[in-house]
Image (cartoon, helix red, strand yellow):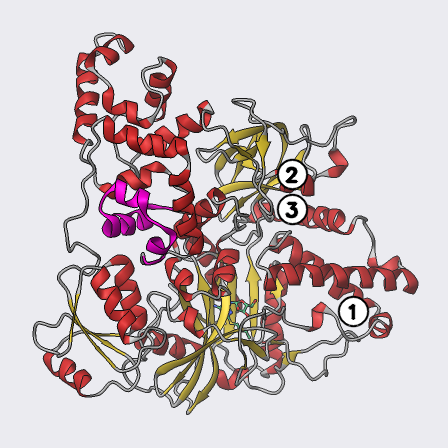
Amino acid sequence: MALPLQRNLRGGPGQLGLVRWAMHRSLDSLSGRVCIVGVMNPSEAQQRIGELRAEVSRHDELYYRRARPEITDFDYDQLKSTLAEWERRFPEVARALGAATPTARVGDDRSEGFVRVKHRLAMMTLDNTYDEGELREFYARLGKALGGEEMAFTVEPKIDGVAVSLTFEQGSLTRAVTRGDGEEGDDVTANVRTIRGLVTQLVGERVPAVIEIRGEIFLREEEFRRINQLQEEAGEAAYANPRNLAAGTLKQLDARLVASRGLEIVVYGLGVCEPAVVSTQTAYHAQLKAWGLPVVERLWSVRGIEAVWAAVQELDRVRRGFVYGTDGAVVKLDSFEQQRHPKIGFRGMGADGRAEVARKLSPRWACAFKFPPDRAETRVRAITIQVGRTGALTPVAELEPVVLAGTTVKRATLHNADEIARKDVRIGDAVLVEKAGEIIPVVVAVLLGQRPVGSAPFVFPQYCPVCQTAASRGAGEVVWRCLNVRCPEKIRRGIEHFASKGGVDIEGLGEEMVALLLAQGLIRTAADIFRLQMADLLPLKKSGEVWAGNLIAAIAARREADLWRVINGLGIPQVGAASAKELARTFRSLDTLAAATTVDLLRVEGFGEKMAAGVVTWFADEANADLQRGLRAAGLNPTPPPAGSGALAGKTFVITGTLPTLSREEAVAKIEAAGGKASGSVSKKTHYLLAGAEAGSKLAKAISLGVPVIDETEFRRLLQVGP
Ligand code: IVH
């Protein structure tokens, strides 16, 4: 797994010292040497600038194009500002090295397979600062440029997502384009149309003829974890954080896959707007909301630098409650007229340090203040290997306990063997830990200066630490696995998962009890649970009649568990609760599912090649087929969902106009597969009118009858989650 990017970290006032120290350290470790810019000579500067340009460009490529960064945002920001400082101090050297420097361009996210589209107005970026003093300087600079005019500001969350520009023409969403290189981005319209909560038609008044609305696409923490778990189970590299996963998802060529991952969007920015409809950022925010678009949760409209700073600090206190990750505050001059004031201008610095190069990189009317990461230093006591239910071997750093963002951290994931080797984490090392996405602690760097003498690189075990079977790793996979179907740890975890809340949900059969039953030889597989008798359980606890009776009753009550729970409980790679529900709806019994071919599975809503293959391969494994038969023999009789109980059961749809990606036949097939009905004419009994471009009289009739009108995006959402 790539090194986590860290954006959502907390930094209280007392932390500045640590942050500065960490900055120094990280620069030191990244560049491999400590240097004082001022005392270098031009030839050393030339080498340094060359190295730093190459290094920043490499990280730009990893971050923007591949969504697989290797260093934290914080370290990246430091690296880039070091380069900027070198270029500022040695402008002749920088010029001699050529104009191609990462400090003079917006990262480039354009990738193969997408049509490139020019933005009507370039998408710029903002300079970052972690320093309160620099924020105050920004304020003072604007005050000076405006010659003492009254100034109002907005303070907004800086959303940690992927920038996108949405074009609405006559109120209709016509294009969604990534930032690209700022001038030209990738057309991701089909993918963006699958985003829930994004209206594709602006509602209400003051809708301009053409408007470019800028925003940020993101994934919620829960969704990030759900998808990452599936990735890991499939032996693929997990994504470092929600932002990377959102970026990776947005660049998928299959809109169906995109629809299965819950991307969301929030909008805040303006490109071209013809005719202009508002004149301040505050009014623009209100207008976006009135048009039905999702906007930032809080926006502070303030005057005076003290009020700006107070708002930034308040944002830092409340941002944890937001549905998206935030990595800072964006402070904007509120008035559009003032923003355009010629004395304010843009930064467009080239390699030569002059500000008058052609490209505008960032406006000077806004400033991004980033919250420093929460980091702490501790030591690695041991590196242990966890065995997951799919056999994945996950290395874990056992740490000397350290308080981080208010909680005591004792363990941190090291993700996989490659990751340990890349960071060269060794037992006994002093390390910096951060909280990634504020939840999972991660080791971000080894403090090489404090490495104990005689330490040795960690050797990833070539065998399962529990059953000692040789571990294996498939071609192109990052995860080592124990493939022993009899591995006691895999079995234990598998049974635990089967009985868990997301699985068959047997009350009283948690982690400890599963371990006890296994240790006593009372169960060997999940099927044995259904063969347990009172007499088996009574000896396990003193005066345990009531407890044993309850457990036996709880097991009996789940003999007819919902089919989807059983499917989910089996732990088939790639299959989570939502896909288990789809499988249950489509196949209606375990036997039918077991016999399903790839072709059958590809017809299931939300299933692509990989998921279909995952199911087929799972049932082809003799041990799994045995388990399935064993469950039946032990009396498990799963309950299929009632007929016609699909997500759209009982709902009647009428389709009109041309849908963006679905043909009429495909839409009808989806409605029917989800238990709904497609009808030809609109009446009071119609539940939804699914309307595409050039919808005619049916649309007018639906509106007059008050029948809800939905577009393809909303239709896809209904298919996933129901009305
Ligand atoms: S305003 C000219 N407002 O952060 C660019 N940007 O580091 C004006 N971002 O490029 C951007 N939240 O991708 C603005 N509330 C917000 C933002 C925001 C996230 C992103 C955006 C921008 C980058 C700047």
Within 8 Å: ligand 1 and the Cβ of disc 1? no
**310 relative to 492, above or below:** below
Q: CA distance from mark 1 to mark 3?
A: 26 Å
Q: CA distance from mark 1 to mark 2?
A: 36 Å
Left or right of 435 in this view: 501: left
Marker disc for residue 420? 2
Magenta residues, start to end: 575-603
Earlier in the chain: of badge 1 and badge 2, it is: 1
Left or right of 77 in this view: 697: left
Report which quarter residue 707 is drawn in.
bottom left
Q: Position of residue 299 (x, y in %)?
A: 41, 67
- Pointer 1 local density, CA inside 10 Å: few below 14, some 14–19, many at least 20: some
Looking at the rendered structure, the kind of residue marked 2 is Ile
- Pointer 3 local density, CA inside 10 Å: few below 14, some 14–19, many at least 20: few
- Pointer 2 local density, CA inside 10 Å: few below 14, some 14–19, many at least 20: many
Within 8 Å: ligand 1 and the Cβ of disc 3? no
Q: Is residue 221 visible?
A: no
Quick one: SS at disc 2? Answer: helix
Q: Residue at x 20, y 32 (%)?
A: 558
Does the segment drawn in magenta span residue 622? no
Which of 19/146 is in front?
A: 19
Earlier in the chain: of badge 1 and badge 3, it is: 3
Quick one: SS at disc 1? Answer: helix
Q: Identify residue for label 1.
A: 88
Q: Is residue 533 visible?
A: yes
Quick one: SS at disc 3? Answer: helix
Q: Position of residue 509 (x, y in %)?
A: 29, 25
Q: Identify residue for label 3.
A: 17
Which of 542/658 is in front?
A: 658
Q: Nearer the viewer, mark 1 or mark 3?
A: 1
Q: Residue at x 20, y 56 (%)?
A: 646
